[in-house]
Image: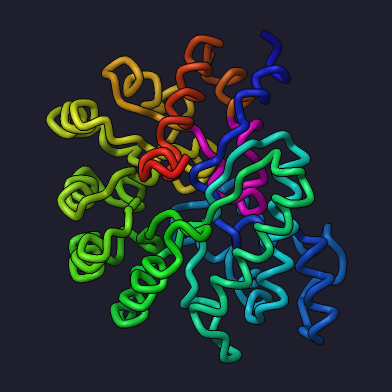
Amino acid sequence: MSIKGMEGYGKIDLHLHLDGSLSAGTILRLAEKDGVKLAAKTEEELLPYITVSRDCRDLNEYLRCFEIPLMILQTEENLFTAAYELGRELGKKGLVYAEIRFAPQLHGRLGTTQEEAVQAVLAGLHKAMEESGDKICLRAILCCMRGEDTHEANLETVRTAAGYLGKGVVAADLAGAEGLYPTGDFAEEFTLARDLGVPVTIHAGEADGPKSIWKALEFGAARIGHGVRAIEDEELMRELAARGIPLEMCPTSNLQTKAAERIVDYPLREYLRRGIKVTVNSDNMTVSDTWAGNEFSLLSKEYGLTEAEAELLYRNAEEAEFDRIAGRA
């Protein structure tokens, strides 16, 4: 199969951030509408601020590209527009299922509540699905945030996720600077998620090592976001395989944040060989300048991904959809 043809396997995206996938054109249009002054006036001028540079040093530097999108996404109207336009773009690219994640607590600078933010995003996703003739299924994951003073807001996020389970929301997550704020510091959030029956995926093993993934498993994670550094722990790899825990791997992003130094050393194939349920995702379409289909093309061209491996990755993604995990498919 041609490299271009490998794009066809990118029909499912389980790890996709809303704020990191806001297009330059949308940002400029919404900024002009709201009277927000930006340092850039054209898409070409704006891209260096919202797309990571080739010499990105680590995850912390990568996260700076979210500053402008978050500045724009502070009203219900803009959240609706962002979700709708992203959902529409995914449909145009041929995706059939995507779980779009965002942190409701980050969108309240102008008074928008977490629940209002969730309602706006779900409405945008619903409109995109309707316009596609239901050719694409779009779901939302609500992110708790790593940080110094995020616990109360995180608990509200988990409670909000519980209230919208089965209504478009499928899970809660923990995102942010993993290396600065260890996964183990957020036990209260995931105790509450368990008590309320909220499925969980956790960013782990990206900027921190295997201990972060072990802690995520202890907290009840049904999936692991990234999980690149599980390769450092033989026992952990056996545990992931035995329990059938899917990994939401994002090759381009993992290379940019230096979770993986070189594509040739990427542990995806070793994980597959050991029976770990790997999936391939985009992470942030704008920040990383990619999309799910492009990830398969990259792996084919630079990693030698075979069609059989691509088919397995696609089947893994189907089985890892939170709708299926929760029995709502």
At 41% across and 36% down in the image, what residue appears? 320
- Which residue sits furthest bottom? 111
Q: Where, quadrant-wise, is the N terminus in this rendering?
A: top right
Residue ID at (72%, 77%): 77
- Residue 42: percent from the left, percent from the top? 87, 65
Q: Residue at x 66, y 58 (%)?
A: 126
User: Considering only vertical position in the picture, is 11 above or below 73?
Assistant: above
Residue 190 inside the magenta-drawn segment: no
- View extreme (left): residue: 235
Q: Nearer the viewer, residue 160 or 39?
A: 160
Relative to residue 124, is residue 251 depicted above or below? above
In the displayed structure, 304 sits above or below 98; it is above
| Residue found 70% across the figure and 43% down from its top | 134
Using the rendered image of the protein, determine whether residue 281 is visible from the camera's viewpoint: yes
In the picture, measured across the screen, residue 68 lies left or right of residue 281, that is right
User: Is residue 62 at least partly visible in the picture?
Assistant: no
Q: Which residues are magenta?
A: 280-295
Above or below, 226 against 308 in this view is: below
Return the x and y of residue 325 as percentages of the image width and height.
36, 40
Residue in front for this viewpoint, 181 or 105: 105
